[in-house]
Each structure stands twice: as C-alpha cells, then as structure tokens.
Image: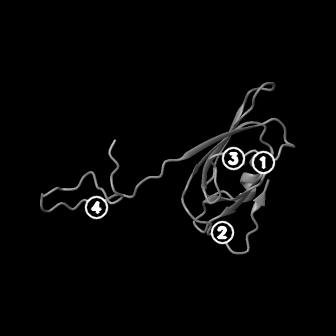
Amino acid sequence: MTERPESYNASSSHGKSGSSKKPTARKLAPTIVSVVRDDKEERIGLALGNKNDGTVVVGTIAEGSLFEGTELKTGMELLSMNVIQLGGGDGGMDSIRCKGKSTKEIADFLRLAVGRITVEAVNAGGLEIIKGMTPHVM
C-alpha cells in the first residue's frame, strides 16, 4: 500500500477545473488496550484530566500499574471504556463513553472495575487541562 502525503485528497480533480471539494480532516485510528484487574485492590494507575473541550485525557500512568507498558500513553484522549466480569459472578459488562464526563465519573467507574478492562483512546495531542482542576488518580 502506498503512503499518501497528509494533504492528499482522494477526491481531487486532477486537471478538471471547477472542483469545489475541500480536503477532509483525517480521522485518527483509535488504540484499544485491555488489561485484567483481578480485584479492586489492584492499582489501575491512571491520572486523568479534562481538556477545555470536554474530552478526558490521560495525565500520567503510574509505574507498576496495570496500564504501564501498554499502548495507552500520556496525552491520549479517552473515547470509551468497558469492563467484562471474568470467572464467577454474572459475567456482566459495564461501559462508559468518556467525552463530556468528568474525571470523577470515570475514576468512580474504574474504581469499581474488576475483570477485563478495555480502553479505547486516540492520540489527539496535548494536555490542555482546565486551570485549577485536580486530576483524579486511581
């Protein structure tokens, strides 16, 4: 597959005049990361912050935590999370969409999570955290 420059527009006119189509913004492919948390005492190790546009970003990932060494990186925007209970119990699933949620809502969701935790995130660049907001650490 040939790499195209960022400014490539698949609908460009290539010599035709009068084309009014503009290049569209590239969509970033999400990163999907799954970890297994056996009990609530196991350290998740994420510090989260909100950007001014309401997105939730990863502020830091603690050393020795579940997400250390995964593809989840500082500065990534969290899109969604789900938890699937493993082993005993009812085998249920919980999920949350992150945009527009407070870091407290997401931290509360993760604090209760036991089982397979799957995070969908995108490298959206930057930590424009709202002034005066204390990131929630889990």
Q: Which of marks 3 and 1 is in front?
A: 3
Q: Distance between the residues labelled 4 and 2?
A: 32 Å
Q: What element carries label 2?
A: loop
Distance from the alpha carbon under mark 4 to that under mark 1:
44 Å
Residue 129's tag is 2
Please, which residue is most extreme toward the right here? 41
C-alpha distance separating marks 2 and 3: 24 Å
Residue holding disc 3? 69
Mark toward the start of the polypeptide (3 vs 4): 4
List the residue tagged with mark 1: 65
Q: Is residue 18 above or below residue 71?
A: below
Q: What element carries label 4?
A: loop
Residue shown at 84% from the left, 37% from the top: 39
**Quarter of the image holding residue 18?**
bottom left
Q: Which residue is drawn at 84% across and 43% down?
A: 42
Earlier-in-chain disc, 2 versus 1: 1
At x 62%, y 66%, the residue is 127
Instruction: Tell me, for residue 22, which label it has, or none.
Output: 4
Q: Kindly identify the amino acid type of the residue bearing the numbered disc 4.
A: Lys
Query: What amino acid is at disc 1?
Result: Ser
Nearer to the camera, 106 or 45: 45
